[in-house]
Image (cartoon, rainbow, N blue to C red):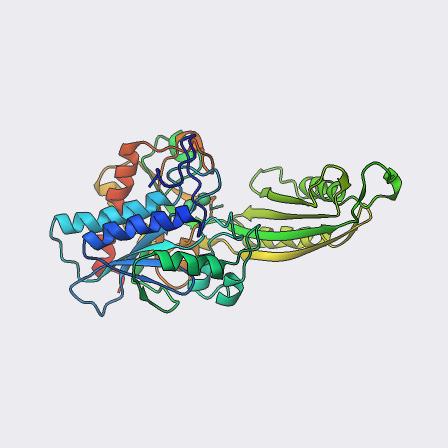
Amino acid sequence: MAEIGATGNGGVNRQALTPEDTRGRQVLLEWAAKRGYTAAIDPIGNLFIRRPGAHPELSPVMTGSHLDSQPTGGRFDGVYGVLAGFEVLETLDDYAVVTERPMELVVWMNEEGSRFPPPTMGSAVASGAMPLERALATLDRNGVTIGDALAVQIEQLPQLQRRPLGTKGHVYIEAHIEQGPLLEAENCDIGIVKGIQGLHAYQVEVTGAEAHAGTTPMRHRKDALVAATTLIARIRSEIADPEDILRFTVGRFEVAPGASSTVPGKVTFIIDLRHPDPDHLLRTGERILQFCSGEVEHCAVSAKILLQSTPVIFNDQVVAMVREAAERRQFKHMSMISGATHDAKYMAEHTPTAMIFVPSEKGISHNEAENTRDEDLAAGTQILCDAMLAVMSAME
Ligand code: GLV
Ligand code: MN
Ligand code: MN
């Protein structure tokens, strides 16, 4: 998989619904076909690979993650959970295990949200948190909609069953790299993930007036770039958190018309805001919306909410079963809350859910240097397999 969209610096660029993403999905579907698994796609492009169980009418034990990446992503973010899940299905085949329930591997559409903001879109639509029409109308930088890009992708995938939106399963367990430094620092093999911190995303638009860079006096300008950078610095200092728990990021920032001799007339940027406490997050979000209205440096500022997902606490029983699996295998483990967001957040709304983390070398992620040791990847996959089998008949 890491060869598909390889960047040359050890990372991947396999953003949602690009030819590289399509290729990744084709390869996985080829592997699935060889094993005789069935595959289906829903209207937002989530892909479901199913290994049958003895009782096809029972809801499946589910796992999954994503194959799409950041523009300069690593080889493990998302793809690890997909391949770990696939490895579980294959292992059960190799040992001729007949499970009571079907097992299903989901490849979520557009988890990263880098080409089409915001993140975790496929699971948001599947669980009813975002309207399908809104997601399909989302534009990339070149004005291509998700709807059009998805139609192109589907044409290039083998014939797939179509299934309606909705992903309720018996249990959902997602394996992922930690993407932070805690497991490595504590010398742990496995993270038992109890929940995910909340994430808000706001799209801010700053409108000034385009003007000639040589002739327009400074005092007459409505420079959208100056206003936007002033605004970001102001917000950053106003919401500063002495405990360093709040996360504030502007990772996408676009200046128009982007010509060196024209005073910028428009800037759009996205604020990514995260905190584990829902009230703190909401209060800070409201303050940000206030800062992003009215006028700054003679420019008009407005903001819209792209995403407001509250922190999520996973199902106690499933979390306990993941912990028991780690204990039985004698892996050193610790409990943690995920700083990164995941599709498990939306699954948790209707299906008993938990996650398994494996260590990230130096805590590096959303970076081409992202790495996890083979033995850690294998340990996480073993725990995923054990836990998926353990929840099969439990959790009635
Ligand atoms: C997921 O990629 C995130 O940004 O947390
Ligand atoms: Mn991920
Ligand atoms: Mn990611």
Q: Residue at x 67, y 41 (%)?
A: 236
> Which quadrant holds the C terminus?
bottom left
Is residue 384 shown to the viewer in this render?
yes
Q: Given the current orientation, which residue lies at the most extreme left position?
A: 96
Residue 26 picture location, percent across and down: 32, 51
**In this view of the protein, which residue sits in the foreground, 196 or 43?**
43
Place residue 234 in its image quadrant: top right
Q: Residue at x 40, y 59 (%)?
A: 45
> Which quadrant holds the N terminus?
top left
Total marks shown come to 0
**In this view of the protein, which residue sits in the foreground, 364 or 217?**
217
Q: Residue at x 41, y 65 (%)?
A: 43
Residue 54 picture location, percent across and down: 15, 64
Side (left or right) of 19 relative to 102: right
Instruction: Examine the rendered structure and indicate whether residue 58 appears above or below residue 63.
Output: below
Residue 152 picture location, percent across and down: 42, 58
Is residue 348 shown to the viewer in this render?
no
Q: Residue at x 61, y 57 (%)?
A: 305
Side (left or right) of 245 relative to 326: right
Residue 207 picture location, percent across and down: 75, 51
